[in-house]
């Protein structure tokens, strides 16, 4: 959900978001926490939490600082905090009582003396220095990758974060094994002229920093709200009857998707109603093997040897056959049930005819082809009733020019009194006469 300050301005961009993105998508800051205690009044304001949460590099890194000043900061304020032999500039993301819950979640004591302090509210000069140093991060990342490749180190540089005052840089890298980067640190310090800190991260942490769109169409959970990563194995996919396909079960990080654990508890609760030790059943045709369990229809699917046909059985039927096998009794058959996978047919007849559904493109093409051929053919054969009375004329039209009702008259030149050679016939007589019969078009 977006923040209340994200009012739409000119161009359709939210005015409240500093990056002109959507707060719900992490445009302003990633891994946001909703402060649901912000509007609740407290009886003792002096006992409020003096520790605030500050995020750096648009939520890529977060840390807690003690507010020892007399100023009160709100969410979204830019402040200057203690850094390594200098200062750093970050954005306030949480204040008040909600911070104590976050400290408990992270396992940090509120009275920890090692917590760094807040210096002041960030001035314009502090922000200008920060923007200058942050603009160097992209070039530093490209150069650091080239240096690591020259030294033939089996590592991947993921991100470079430079402190606001430009005195320290943190290089985040990924490596499968331990890397001896003592020579690399010396080269980095001489190349960038600042203090270097190397920090190893995992593939999931890299995906959280880079971000992206998952197969579900939404942003990655690790880059929006997921902060702790639990282990995921293929057992979760088997419980949910998912095919073990590495390309479909893997996320952007190359590991198994974290969302495989979201519905695992629901599947485990539903599978408790299914009988145990029912992987095989003895019937007259052989040993039936269990292939899957459908928790939505409460069915268990079995397959017989030397056959690819699958038989759905109810839970009660499986238990009955299982009890018979325990008594050394072999069932005659599995007794499968019928499963309707298709859509139900509409029995009620509608009171109208769907003409659109009866017309296909082929029929339209045939009709168009007939029209074009009928336009070029002016000679039409007479019907079967008039072919014997064609007269002495030729075969043009129903009676030809001289014998039948051709195109030049209702009865030809000699037989039609209103024809062209009839002295009493006129053009008006020809127009008002009966139309010439036409043969129906041929079917192709």
Image (cartoon, helix red, strand yellow):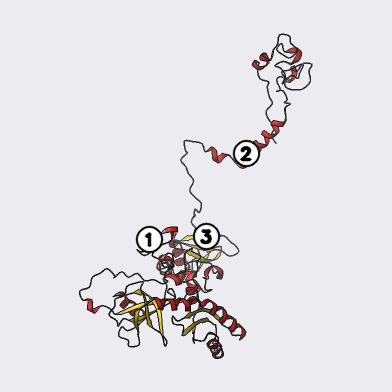
Q: Which mark is residue 364?
A: 2
User: Quarter of the image containing the C terminus?
Assistant: top right
Q: Is residue 392 left or right of residue 192?
A: right
> Within 10 angstroms of label 2, few (less than 14), some, or many (20 or more) residues?
few
**Image point 76% across, 16% down: which residue?**
403
Front position in the image: 184 or 225? 184
Of the image marks 2 and 1, the number of the one nearer the N terminus: 1
Q: Nearer the viewer, mark 2 or mark 1?
A: 1
> Within 10 angstroms of label 1, few (less than 14), some, or many (20 or more) residues?
few
The residue that mark 3 highlights is: 311
Q: Could you say which quadrant of the image residue 440 lies in?
A: top right
**Image point 52% across, 60% down: which residue?**
311
Q: CA distance from mark 3 to mark 2?
A: 46 Å
**Image point 32% across, 86% down: which residue?**
112
Q: Nearer the viewer, mark 3 or mark 2?
A: 2
Position in image of residue 275 (x %, y %)? 43, 67
Describe the element under mark 3 as helix, strand or loop. strand
The residue that mark 1 highlights is: 7
Of the image marks 1 and 3, the number of the one nearer the N terminus: 1
- The answer to whether the residues at label 1 and label 3 have Cβ atoms under 8 Å apart is no
Q: Is residue 261 visible?
A: no
* Residue extending furthest toward the left: 43
Describe the element under mark 2 as helix, strand or loop. helix
Q: CA distance from mark 1 to mark 3?
A: 58 Å
Position in image of residue 107 (x %, y %)? 35, 82
Front position in the image: 413 or 315? 413
Q: CA distance from mark 2 to mark 1?
A: 53 Å
Of the image marks 3 and 2, the number of the one nearer the N terminus: 3
Position in image of residue 362 (x %, y %)? 63, 41
Q: Nearer the viewer, mark 1 or mark 3?
A: 1
């Amino acid at each position: 959900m977006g923040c209340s300050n994200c009012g739409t301005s000119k161009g359709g961009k939210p005015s409240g978001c500093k990056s002109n993105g959507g707060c719900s998508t992490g445009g302003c800051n990633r891994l946001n926490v909703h402060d649901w205690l912000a509007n609740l009044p407290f009886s003792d304001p002096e006992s409020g939490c003096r520790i605030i949460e500050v995020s750096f590099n648009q939520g890529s890194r977060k840390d807690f600082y003690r507010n020892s000043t007399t100023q009160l900061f709100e969410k979204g304020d830019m402040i200057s905090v203690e850094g390594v032999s200098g200062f750093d500039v970050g954005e306030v993301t949480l204040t008040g009582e909600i911070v104590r819950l976050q400290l408990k979640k992270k396992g940090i004591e509120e009275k920890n003396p090692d917590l760094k302090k807040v210096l002041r509210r960030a001035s314009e000069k502090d922000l200008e220095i920060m923007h200058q140093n942050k603009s160097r991060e992209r070039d530093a990342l490209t150069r650091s990758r080239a240096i690591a490749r020259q030294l033939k180190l089996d590592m991947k540089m993921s991100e470079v974060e430079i402190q606001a005052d430009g005195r320290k840089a943190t290089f985040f890298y990924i490596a499968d094994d331990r890397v001896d980067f003592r020579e690399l640190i010396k080269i980095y310090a001489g190349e960038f002229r600042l203090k270097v800190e190397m920090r190893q991260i995992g593939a999931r942490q890299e995906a959280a920093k880079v971000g992206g769109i998952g197969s579900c169409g939404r942003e990655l959970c690790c880059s929006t709200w997921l902060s702790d990563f639990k282990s995921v194995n293929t057992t979760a996919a088997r419980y949910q009857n998912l095919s073990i396909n590495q390309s479909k079960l893997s996320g952007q990080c190359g590991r198994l998707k974290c969302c495989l654990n979201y519905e695992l508890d629901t599947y485990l609760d539903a599978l408790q109603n299914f009988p145990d030790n029912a992987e095989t059943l003895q019937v007259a045709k052989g040993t039936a093997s269990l292939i899957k369990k459908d928790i939505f229809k409460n069915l268990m699917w079995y397959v017989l040897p030397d056959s690819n046909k699958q038989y759905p059985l109810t839970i009660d039927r499986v238990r009955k056959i299982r009890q018979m096998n325990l008594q050394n009794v072999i069932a005659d058959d599995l007794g499968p049930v019928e499963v309707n996978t298709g859509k139900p047919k509409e029995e009620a007849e509608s009171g109208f005819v769907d003409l659109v559904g009866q017309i296909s493109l082929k029929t339209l093409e045939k009709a168009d082809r007939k029209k074009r051929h009928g336009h070029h053919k002016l000679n039409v054969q007479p019907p079967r009733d008039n072919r014997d009375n064609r007269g002495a004329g030729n075969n043009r039209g129903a009676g030809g020019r001289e014998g039948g009702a051709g195109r030049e008259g209702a009865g030809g030149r000699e037989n039609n009194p209103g024809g062209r050679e009839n002295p009493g016939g006129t053009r008006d007589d020809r127009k008002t006469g009966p139309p010439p019969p036409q043969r129906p078009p041929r079917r192709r």
